[in-house]
Image (cartoon, helix red, strand yellow):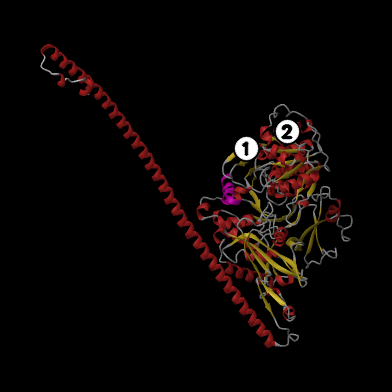
């Protein structure tokens, strides 16, 4: 970069720092004339619509003018949009009109009330005055209001049917205050009920400036985004950052990419995308689901920065993705790790785009004690990926969540964050806001910190995450991170869906016990279950060196996840406790969870449906009795397993018999239907034949009548002739007289 370009860059940065909102930056950049645009791909493959930044500004002005005229400034607008450019127009219009935007996932407004439950909770919390969407998402609003009459006073606007684009596009707008709330960003609810994070215009602009540090953006960058706009990563980086940086963006439906990950990489290849992102699971999906045929012709050489964020990053996934797609032009340096959360607008830390991912291999045993130490040659390893350094003006501290004091450099603790990107609190929740956003540290006077609830540590200036405080499993004082076991479980059996396992603990008899909820593939819905149970117990034992209390194998596609694909362990735990999991089979292995003290107590112990009574031991010193008890236990387990297998066989036999009977009944039913049809045909034919026969008889009767009449006429003529002969010549006596009646 030459001196002039450097001066221009510095000048632009100073202007942005003096700006109070993204709206100001976008208007200034657009007035300079830019060629950037947004393009939506309807099914992840076909271009549906393209909108330049100039056209976007014009249409957003008109929509904002309508909002302002209707008096919605300062009020909340629920935004119910599928993927498309209408959302981009509407969101920018909200910024311009000083309307607080509240994006939510589009769900059917009628039908299954469970699907609309989250949106109803958000509406109840934020009390909107306006609902924005398109005809596809809110066209049946009348039916929704009929079911939920408390929202009868809301105004509903279908943006795709808005017809005042030209008449309102010339209105002027006041620039919003930097401290005014621009957005209520509702948390995904991975560990609790959704809460509205209050983000100001300053929060958003500060975070967008951070996105532009070290990630390799320039004027020719092209961003490909499939992460939904109602998720912080999709909204801030996928939608708003292209406005801020004046670059083009290509938007794909998240559902289309989840169903067929090749659509994502194909879009990067076809449109020469330079930047794209996604949670760790999508990189795993590309490795597992993309066939050789789908990879043919891919050219990923333009992909400069592949952001991996929004959930814990697995070293194994990074290595697999790099290995699989390097032959198609993917640069290993492109994989870029970052860390962030909605309460800090979005991004908090990130590595430089041209630096390799840093993987730290630690002693798993020490990490369970919150100690950070490199693993020795014979130790179990916990491989963690660095999430980069804190971005500008952001302070990150590692704090003991119990003592609320800063941790030593070799200790793991809760991640605390301070900076202009941190929100002011949760909407209408002052107590929770004070607890989460009002933390202080004596070592950093004058600063207020956000308690993230995430666990991690800082090593050589980079942040590493290890889990969530509320997800942490603590057994006998040792810490166990669920993701350690989950990463092993997804590879433990071919019947397990990757990234669809929840490991958590439940309290039983005063002790935390491990529970595993694992989703099955469609091809393994019917087992082999015993093999699966064994695989799970081995994987958890390898990760935790702990037994498993219970295992729940659940139906395909039913794992509780957030919109970004994070496992919702608390929801899975609650579903396990209240019995609402969609189960295929469950196994209770409670006996194996008991420690030696339980064995020596002489009490009855439970192993699923069987119970074993053990004799009282003399302080554990009677090894013979203990061995005998163990033998009895093994015998009982073997017997139980045999009975279970026998029961499963009986079930299979019964199902086979039912299927055979169903086939026989179906055959008999088909034969009966055929007979009925034959009888009907025969009856029809018989009826038709009888009708024809009657017609013939009637015809013959008519002919006979005609012949009889003719014969009578001839008889009359003959009588007349006889009488004439008698009159002329005689020769007939009286006894030979013939009458017409006799002749007849």
Residue at left 71%, top 77%? 604
First in sequence: mark 1 or mark 2?
Answer: 1
Q: Is residue 269 magenta-colored?
A: yes
Residue 708 x, y percent position in the rendering: 25, 24
**Looking at the image, residue 271 lies above or below residue 334:** above
The answer to whether residue 451 of the structure is visible from this angle is yes
Secondary element at image label 1: strand
For residue 579, which numbered disc appears in the image?
none
Residue 275 x, y percent position in the rendering: 64, 49
For residue 63, which numbered disc appears in the image?
2
**Viewport quadrant of the C terminus:** top left
Label 1 sits on residue: 50
Seen as rendered, the residue at the extreme top is: 728
Which contiguous range is marked in magenta? 258-271
Residue 267 x, y percent position in the rendering: 58, 46
Secondary element at image label 2: helix
């Amino acid at each position: 970069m030459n001196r002039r370009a450097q001066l221009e860059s510095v000048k632009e940065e100073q202007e942005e720092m003096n700006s109070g909102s993204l709206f100001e930056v976008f208007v200034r950049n657009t007035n300079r004339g830019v060629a950037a645009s947004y393009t939506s791909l309807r099914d992840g493959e076909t271009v549906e619509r393209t909108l330049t930044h100039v056209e976007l500004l014009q249409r957003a002005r008109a929509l904002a003018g309508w909002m302002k005229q209707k008096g919605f400034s300062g009020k909340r607008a629920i935004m119910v949009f599928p993927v498309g450019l209408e959302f981009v127009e509407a969101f920018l219009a909200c910024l311009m009109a000083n309307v607080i935007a509240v994006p939510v996932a589009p769900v059917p407004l009628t039908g299954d009330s469970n699907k609309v439950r989250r949106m109803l909770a958000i509406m109840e919390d934020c009390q909107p005055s306006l609902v924005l969407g398109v005809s596809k998402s809110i066209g049946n609003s009348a039916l929704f209001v009929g079911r939920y009459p408390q929202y009868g006073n809301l105004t509903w606007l279908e943006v795709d049917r808005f017809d005042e684009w030209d008449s309102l596009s010339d209105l002027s707008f006041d620039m919003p205050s930097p401290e005014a709330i621009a957005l209520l960003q509702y948390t995904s609810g991975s560990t609790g009920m959704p809460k509205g994070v209050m983000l100001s215009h300053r929060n958003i602009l500060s975070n967008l400036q951070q996105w532009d540090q070290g990630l390799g953006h320039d004027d020719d960058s092209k961003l490909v985004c499939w992460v939904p706009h109602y998720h912080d990563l999709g909204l801030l980086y996928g939608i708003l950052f292209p406005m801020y940086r004046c670059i083009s963006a290509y938007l794909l439906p998240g559902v289309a990419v989840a169903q067929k990950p090749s659509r994502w990489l194909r879009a990067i290849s076809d449109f020469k995308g330079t930047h794209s992102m996604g949670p760790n699971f999508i990189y795993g999906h590309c490795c597992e689901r993309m066939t050789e045929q789908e990879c043919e012709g891919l050219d990923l050489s333009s992909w400069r920065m592949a952001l991996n964020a929004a959930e814990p990053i697995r070293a194994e996934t990074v290595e697999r993705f790099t290995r699989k797609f390097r032959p198609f032009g993917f640069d290993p340096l492109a994989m870029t790790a970052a860390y962030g959360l909605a309460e800090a607008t979005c991004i908090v830390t990130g590595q430089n785009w041209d630096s390799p991912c840093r993987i730290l291999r630690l002693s798993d045993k020490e990490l369970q004690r919150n100690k950070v130490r490199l693993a020795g040659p014979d130790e179990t390893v916990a491989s963690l990926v660095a999430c980069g350094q804190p971005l500008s003006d952001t302070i990150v501290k590692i704090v003991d969540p119990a003592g609320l004091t800063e941790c030593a450099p070799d200790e793991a603790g809760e991640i605390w964050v301070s900076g202009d990107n941190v929100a002011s609190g949760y909407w209408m929740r002052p107590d929770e806001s004070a607890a989460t956003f009002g933390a202080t540290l004596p070592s950093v006077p004058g600063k207020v910190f956000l308690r993230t609830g995430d666990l991690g540590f800082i090593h050589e200036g980079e942040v590493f995450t290890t889990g969530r405080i509320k997800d942490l499993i603590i057994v006998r004082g040792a810490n166990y991170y669920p993701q350690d076991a989950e990463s092993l479980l997804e590879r433990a059996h071919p019947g397990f869906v990757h990234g669809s396992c929840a490991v958590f603990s439940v309290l039983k008899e005063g002790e935390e016990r491990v529970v595993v909820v694992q989703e099955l593939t469609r091809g393994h819905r019917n087992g082999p279950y015993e093999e699966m149970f064994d695989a799970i117990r081995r994987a958890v034992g390898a990760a935790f060196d702990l037994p498993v209390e219970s295992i729940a194998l659940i139906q395909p596609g039913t794992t509780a996840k957030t919109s970004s694909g994070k496992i919702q362990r608390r929801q899975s735990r609650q579903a396990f406790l209240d019995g609402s999991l969609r189960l295929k089979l469950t196994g209770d292995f409670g006996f194996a969870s008991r420690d030696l003290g339980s064995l020596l107590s002489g009490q009855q112990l439970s192993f699923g449906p069987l119970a074993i009574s053990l004799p009282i031991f003399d302080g554990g010193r009677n090894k013979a009795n203990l061995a005998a008890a163990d033998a009895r236990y093994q015998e009982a387990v073997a017997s139980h397993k045999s009975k279970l297998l026998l029961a499963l066989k009986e079930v299979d036999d019964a199902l086979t018999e039912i299927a055979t009977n169903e086939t026989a009944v179906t055959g008999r039913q088909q034969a009966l239907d055929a007979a009925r049809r034959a009888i009907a045909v025969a009856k029809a034919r018989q009826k038709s034949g009888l009708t024809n026969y009657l017609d013939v008889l009637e015809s013959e009767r008519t002919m006979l009548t005609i012949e009889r009449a003719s014969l009578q006429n001839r008889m009359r003529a003959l009588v007349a002739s006889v009488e004439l002969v008698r009159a002329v010549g005689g020769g007939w006596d009286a006894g030979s007289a013939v009458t017409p009646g006799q002749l007849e």
